[in-house]
């Protein structure tokens, strides 16, 4: 859905005009779809690591590039400080889409860390498994 929405924006003439004036934060002069870069965060567990292993291929299949980092890994019940430190790595690498392979406790902490960082990626996708 994220890639489809980006493609739809890129196809609109009125939005293409805004590209040149950089009025919309999604574009950065390259178009909405091209500006999407996925970063991955996983919980240190067999199920979530396996789930995240397929995520870069999923992103590519939909036309979304990935940051050059492998998925960052959180403990099962991370602290907000731990999550903030790891998410900062993805932010610094240029992630504009955050994909998380998590359990409920980590998902809540990721949201708290994003708030603490004052970071709003274009999209946050958290698959949340019950603890």
Image (cartoon, rainbow, N blue to C red):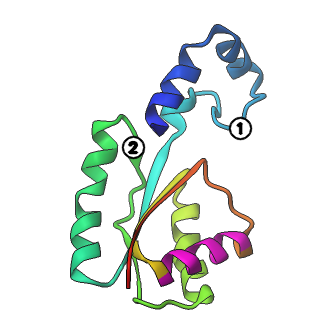
Q: CA distance from mark 1 to mark 2?
A: 18 Å
Residue bounds of the magenta highlight: 105-115
* Residue 59 colored in magenta in the image: no
Query: Where is the N terminus found, in terms of image quarters?
Result: top left
Q: How many marks?
A: 2
Check the image and name the residue furthest to the top.
13
Tell me which corner region of the image, top left, top right, bottom left or bottom right, holds residue 20.
Answer: top right
Q: Decide: is 51 above or below 2.
A: below
Label 1 SS: loop
The spot of residue 2 in percent (x, y) is: 48, 39
* Residue 112 colored in magenta in the image: yes
Q: Counting other residues with Cα less than 10 Å from the Cα at mark 1, is it few (<14), some (14-19), or many (20 or more)? A: few
Q: Is residue 68 left or right of residue 53?
A: right
Tell me which corner region of the image, top left, top right, bottom left or bottom right, holds residue 102.
Answer: bottom left
Residue occupying the point 36% across, 34% down: 63
The spot of residue 34 in percent (x, y) is: 49, 33
Q: Decide: is 57 above or below 111.
A: above
Residue occupying the point 46% across, 91% down: 77
Mark seen at residue 49: none
Query: Where is the C terminus found, in terms of image quarters?
Result: bottom left
Residue occupying the point 23% across, 57% down: 54
Residue at the spot of label 1 = 25
Residue at the spot of label 2 = 65
Per the picture, the main secondary structure of the magenta-coloured stretch is: helix
The spot of residue 95 in percent (x, y) is: 52, 55
Label 2 SS: strand
Q: Counting other residues with Cα less than 10 Å from the Cα at mark 2, is it few (<14), some (14-19), or many (20 or more)? A: many
């Amino acid at each position: 859905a994220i890639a489809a929405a980006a493609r739809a924006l890129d196809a609109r003439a009125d939005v293409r005009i805004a590209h040149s004036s950089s009025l919309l934060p999604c574009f950065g002069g390259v178009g909405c779809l091209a500006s999407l870069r996925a970063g991955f965060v996983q919980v240190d567990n067999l199920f979530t690591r396996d789930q995240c292993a397929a995520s870069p291929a999923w992103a590519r299949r939909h036309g979304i590039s990935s940051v050059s980092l492998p998925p960052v890994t959180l403990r099962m019940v991370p602290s907000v400080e731990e999550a903030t430190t790891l998410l900062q790595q993805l932010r610094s690498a240029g992630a504009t889409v955050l994909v998380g392979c998590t359990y409920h406790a980590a998902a809540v902490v990721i949201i708290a860390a994003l708030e603490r960082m004052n970071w709003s990626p274009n999209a946050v996708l958290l698959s949340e498994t019950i603890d």
